[in-house]
Amino acid sequence: MTQLRRTTIAEELAVRHAQSADLYTQALDVFPSGVTHDSRFMGPFPIYVTRAQGSHKWDVDGNEYVDYFGGHGALILGHCHPQVTAAVTEQVHKGSHYGACHALEIEWGRLVQELVPSTRSGGKVKFVSSGTEATLMALRLARAFTGKDVVVKMRGHFHGWHDYATIGMSEPWDAPSSNGVPLGVRQSMRAVPAGDIAALEAALQPGDVAAVIMLLNGLSTEYLQQVRAVTSKHGVVLIFDEVVTGFRYAPGGAQEYFGVTPDLSTHAKILAGGYPGGSVSGRADIMNMLEHRPDAEWQRFKRVSHPGTFNANPVSAAAGIACLSLVKDPAVQKRATATADKIRAGMNDAFERHGVGGSAGGEVSILSVQFYNPKITGSELIWRFRGAMQLGGVDFSYLGGMVSAVHDDRDVDQTVTAFDQALVRLQEEGVV
């Protein structure tokens, strides 16, 4: 008797996601490659979502998912948290953009001062519209403050999509991760391996470095303390990019979690409760480079200028206040981390039971999955894995995801079951 062939992951996705496939075909006529963010590009097509609530979301075909995309990491309180939604709804009826100062921006800024270690004790805040804008502003401030041009970053650390951030993102490390970046920009950046304090010391030795910018996840307190010491010794501004880790590792972010304080911090995502918003904050003497002064020389040649149409807009400010007022309670981060630990344990058990080389890791509420010897790599592995998880009613981001404080034990069970089934499918298709 002939045994029926089981449908592949791609074939089953096509059946279950017919309307998403149709919308993607339409999108190809509107957007390059049909998407509006690189991470939403997925083969054979991305899903199209219609609504989300708590830890779940639903697509146009009626499929329900436990969501670990988490608004690109912005939603530690889950989708449509009632207090955030209420604050935004109230503000929208009052106005979305005044083109003027408002009291909400002060309240929002004071919460940043209260929570972020680098901004306590007289530190200042500047709001922008995104994480990319925040890191760009931080680099400009450091260069203006020190009078030096070069910035050192860690290889593979993502700091947004502006020109400077494209350097050192992938091998070869001296080539930008995007076309269209001027040679002069490339020459103003140096990338060193994270965790190698000797390499960092060597990069600072010429004396032309304005700042070191870095992520904190995956590093150790000891190394971060060494970075703090060596940058202080060389008079270099230390910038912690906490766009992802801010308010997630602890109420004060990863710098509170590791106990090391930078000169400047950049934030976005959780900062604005799922709405557009970012910030640069830290030492007052550096932040005061943004000050207006009754000095023509200062205003024209020394001051750091910074407009920005949607800086601290009242809707984002209302969302940010509501969100930060909740996440300043460390129980929020602890709940998310405890749930992530359960998921990691379940996934690692599945790896062992199926004899698949791999591990589930990540820090606090950030999940990461690693396959040791996959038969395919890169985007193809990510798409196949994510598609297999979607068939189990779970949507991951790349090979991992963000756990919120509202994911519960039912979500854990569904996620581990989906992962178990995904490993079976990936084995059947010769992926792992």
Image: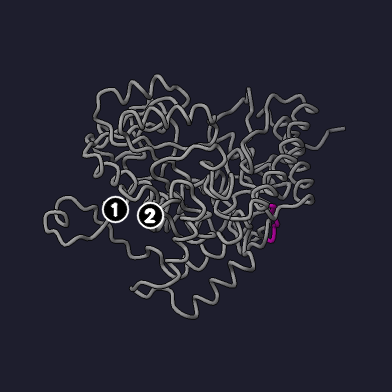
Q: Residues within 10 Å of mark 2 (few under 14, many from 20)?
A: many
Instruction: Find disc 1 in the rendering and name its residue.
Output: 288
Pointer 2 and pointer 1: residues touching (CB < 8 Å)?
yes
Which residue: 72% across, 44% down?
Answer: 338
Q: Is residue 76 left or right of residue 237?
A: right
Q: For the magenta stretch, what is the residue range?
A: 62-67
List the residue tagged with mark 2.
124
The amino acid beneath tag 1 is: Asn
- Say which residue appears at 40% left-offset and 53% top-offset: 122
Give the overall secondary structure of the magenta segment: strand
- The image shows residue 260, relative to residue 292, as above or below, that is above
Q: Position of residue 321 (x, y in %)?
A: 52, 64
Quarter containing the N terminus: top right
Does the image show residue 185?
Answer: yes
In the image: residue 321, left or right of residue 77: left
What residue occupies the far left of the structure in this picture?
A: 297
